[in-house]
Amino acid sequence: MKRWIFHFISACCLIGTAGCSHLVSYLEIAREKGMSGEYLAVLNEWTRSQVIYSQFETQAHLSATYQSPEFNRAYLDEYARIYQLQEKERKKQEDVRMTAEFTEFIFYASLPEKTSNDFDRRGSIWTIFLVNGKGERIDPWEVRRIDPVTPVITKFFPYVNPYHGMVYRLRFHPVRKTEATSLKLVITGVLGTAELKFVKR
């Protein structure tokens, strides 16, 4: 079953957005390190990757995971499996994750010029915003760099490499369920623009 799920992930990525082959290699590594195929399938479904180019030069490798209700349930199941949580502990974790007050993303950026990796800085060279299903722009409530990057982060989000890039938590005011069927995360600046589209596959 796990092998079939992994092959399904690979097939999806072959027709997915640019940068997905990069994600597949990390999903394979994660599978070999003991992450379940079920979790990795959901992670792939809610993760998008894109490379920004300018004049044939790579400006940024970007990946983001939308922490949708489906993703949060899969994350919780995997966390409970790894840590062998008892039902009471699992329920406590579920109450925290499933009652989130924000629409959230885990966002990873790797740039050749590290000083340009300043998404959380006031006056950043980048602008980030979300576009909901109605085409309305939503500016982030918070862009927070995750530091230190723990093994929990690199295990559950295997595309994160703290030696090559930085990982952030993006929080937006909650998007209504009817407007969350199609979301677009836009990252734009003088180095280029990326649009990561999240539509359930």
Image (cartoon, rainbow, N blue to C red):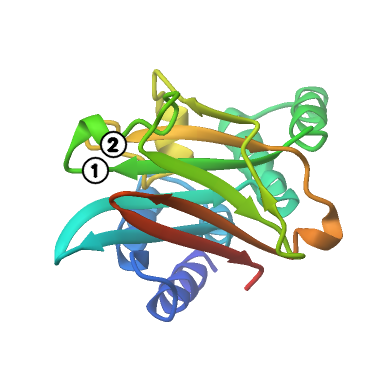
Q: Tell me the residue that label 2 is attached to.
A: 165
| Residue 143 vs residue 190, the one in the foreground | 190
Please report the residue visible at 24 percent of the width from the left and 62 percent of the height from the top.
53
Mark 2 to mark 1 CA distance (whole Å): 7 Å
Packing grade of label 1 (10 A; few <14, some 14-19, many >=20) is some
Q: Which kind of residue does numbered mark 1 sit on?
A: Leu
- Relative to 136, 95 lies left or right: right
Q: Which kind of residue does numbered mark 2 sit on?
A: Gly
- Tell me the quadrant of the picture where the N terminus can be found: bottom right
Secondary-structure class at tag 1: loop
- Callout in the foreground (2, 1): 1
> Is 42 drawn above or below residue 126 in the view shown?
below
Residue 64, percent across and down?
48, 49
Residue 162, percent across and down?
29, 31
Q: Tell me the residue that label 1 is attached to.
A: 111
Q: Is there a contact, CB below 8 Å, between mark 2 and mark 1?
A: yes
Does any portion of residue 184 appear in the rendered image?
Answer: yes
